[in-house]
Amino acid sequence: MAEKIIVEPLADGQVIRVTLNAPKANVLDGAMMSDIQEFLDILTFQSDVKLVQFTGAGDNFSFGASVPEHTKENAPQMLKQFHKLFYTLADLAIPTAAIVSGQCLGGGLELALMCNFMFLDQTAKLGQPEISLGVFAPPASLILPMKVGQAHADNLLLSGKIISAEDAMRIGLATALYDDHEAMLAGVDKWVEKIILPKSASSLKHAVRAARLEFNAVIKEKLSEQEKLYLNELMATCDANEGIQSFLERRKPEWKNE
């Protein structure tokens, strides 16, 4: 496996920890997404995995997807590659957990949102800041309303605000909150030992399919519609392109409201 991710088997291979390995930002660029996809494809042939964990190297989970890959010419390939991860995770039906320290933003938060469980420490900061760049977050626009309700989803998606770990717990976004990274890893290990390891891998997969029947149907049926809206309508506007370009040029955007 390439160095953009680190794959670590735990508990005799019943748990696999995937570390996004491009600190400090752990940007989900095309190379990293390709490595994650390769790993997920291999999982298709492994029947004894009970949990896949995603975490980030260094102080942060992920700053999100690569902004240069959001430009009009690159967005079609980027979205196709990114969204394939969500379809694959849905089809695998292996329980997943995000272990989050530091910044968890944009596409990084979307990957965490796709997980069945989300563990945070006090340094965690979560948000979907895409609207500040004049664009929107397709997977999060579907997942957040299902996870935390429309009001909280609108607050995150339309404001671009970044919330604390405490606020994430308050709105029901996370499973558990720990004081620091070390306490979180120890706590997750205990949780895995108590909750995951005693169960059948096969039964867990069937339970995930059952619990996420409607959730996965929304992902599979509506994410392609979000992708078309993004590519065919949003990226045809002046402001979406201005937002991305201004970020790359490190200047304030000049909105034309069109």
Image: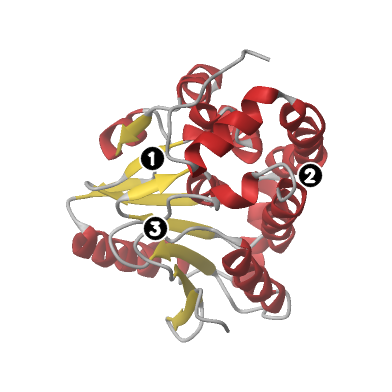
Seen in the image, is 107 located left or right of residue 90? left
Q: Nearer the viewer, mark 3 or mark 2?
A: 3
Labels 1 and 2: the sequence-earlier one: 1
Nearest the eye: 95 or 156: 156
Q: CA distance from mark 3 to mark 2?
A: 29 Å
Vertical placement of residue 77 versus 215, above or below = below
| Dot 1 alpha-carbon crowd within 10 angstroms: few under 14, some 14 to 19, many 20 or more | many
Disc 1 is placed on an element classified as strand
Query: Residue visible at 38% across and 45% down?
Result: 175
Return the residue at label 3: 25
Toward which corner of the image does residue 205 lie, by quadrant?
Answer: bottom right
User: Which amino acid type is marked by label 1?
Assistant: Leu
Return the residue at label 2: 220
User: Which amino acid type is marked by label 2?
Assistant: Lys
Vertical placement of residue 166 versus 185, above or below = above
Query: Residue visible at 78% across and 30% down?
Result: 229
Return the residue at label 1: 126
Labels 3 and 2: the sequence-earlier one: 3
Q: Are the residues flagged by discs 3 and 1 in contact, CB closer than 8 Å?
A: no
Furthest residue toward top: 257
Does any portion of residue 214 appear in the rendered image? yes
